Amino acid sequence: MLHFKTELEELRINNLYRLQQCHDNKLLNFGENDYLGLRKNKVISSAIKRSIDENGNGSGASALVTGYFSSHKNVENAISNALNFEDGIFYQSGFTANLSFFKTIIDSKFEIFLDKLCHASIYEGVKNTNAKITRYPHLNIDKLEQDLKKSKISKKIIVTDSVFSMDGDCADISSLIDLSNKYKTLLFIDDAHGFGVYGKNGLGLLEHQGLLKKNKKNLIHLTTFGKSAGITGAVLCANKETIEFLRQKSKDYIYTTAPPPYIADGVLSAFQLIMNGSQLRDKLNENIGLFKQSFKFPKLLLNVDGPIQPIMICDNEKVLKIQKKAIQKGIYLSAIRSPTVPKSLSRIRITIGANHTKDEILFLNQILNECIKNEI
């Protein structure tokens, strides 16, 4: 056990130690992924309370025993129907869904073509497959096609986030679908940070890029509810055979207690608010514009228009100093360092929400501008 002490000390020396703190409601929060401000929404809270009164505090068993309620089915149907998929399966989290899909569906006979900046949960899932893994440069469609051409393996899958959680940029889903059809591959899309934010009805990047009516025979799509929906859980959508295979074979789904039905009922309530949430998305986009306009160091920002706004400080020690000073002023910011991003690309990750006021965003930038001026 002594090596734990040594490794922990190395994390502290290299400014990579992560200090876990209890959530402080007194801090102005620009670090959470609650993009639409639904985490404390009273309509959702009421739906959850009604469900607890009706169904109890938990599900009581795994989904294939007695833990599967109409609440779960209603969410699966709502998401899969809205996105024009044949079926969906409800998981405890997006992380679990990613692990489950890759461990259960993808085997050593596959070659996986993976965007280098995919989420850690995808990497954890792919490592369990024993498949050949080819990582292509971030968003580089041309290099991906070159790699696909070179492949001698018949079973292939392209894997991508829709919106990348640390950079905030978006995949070209239309081009990926075209490549998937051309080279007869599966295509896996994790829309964790797209759902709620993008699209006329908040259905994510498929809707935003006009792809809801595209043929989805080769497509697997993940919608998660821990970000814009303000709750937790995820629905994985695909054709009926794929979803049924997961229900019958996925150990992560079969051998664990199902999520409480009140989670699913809360998600369904959030989904209805998202579908009718054009005003929330308009406010979110207005807030993003105000942030970018009043921030005095635009060269430190990546050229993205979504709620994820990374400030590229590229120095672990400075990132931690800026975070500490902001907290002292009453603002919580995320200090992102290795291994989440490469050591040379450490950053402050700002997340803008629809619930932030104009004065709060201006105060954020006042503090940021002061802190960054003293550190660069």
Image (cartoon, rainbow, N blue to C red):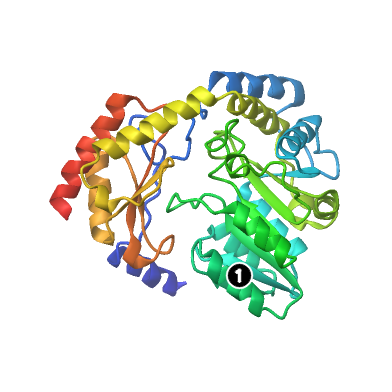
Residue of label 1? 145
Residue reaching furthest left? 374
Give the residue displayed 35% in from the left and 52% down from the top.
302
Q: Quadrant of residue 141?
A: bottom right
Looking at the image, residue 135 lies above or below residue 69: below
Quadrant of the rendered structure where residue 293 is?
Answer: top left
Amino acid type, residue under disc 1 in the picture: Glu
Name which residue lies at 75% across and 38% down.
Answer: 76
Q: At which x and y percent is residue 353? A: 42, 33
- x, y (%) of residue 223? 64, 43
As drawn, 161 above or below 63: below
Which one is nearer the viewer's eye here, 267 or 78? Answer: 78
Q: Is residue 182 above or below residue 217?
A: below
Would you say 343 lies left or right of 244 here? left
Task: Name the residue nearer the viewer: 200 or 330.
Answer: 200
| Residue 102 can be seen in this image | no
- Image quarter of the C terminus: bottom left
Q: Does residue 145 show up? A: yes
**Image quadrant in which you'd find residue 295:** top left
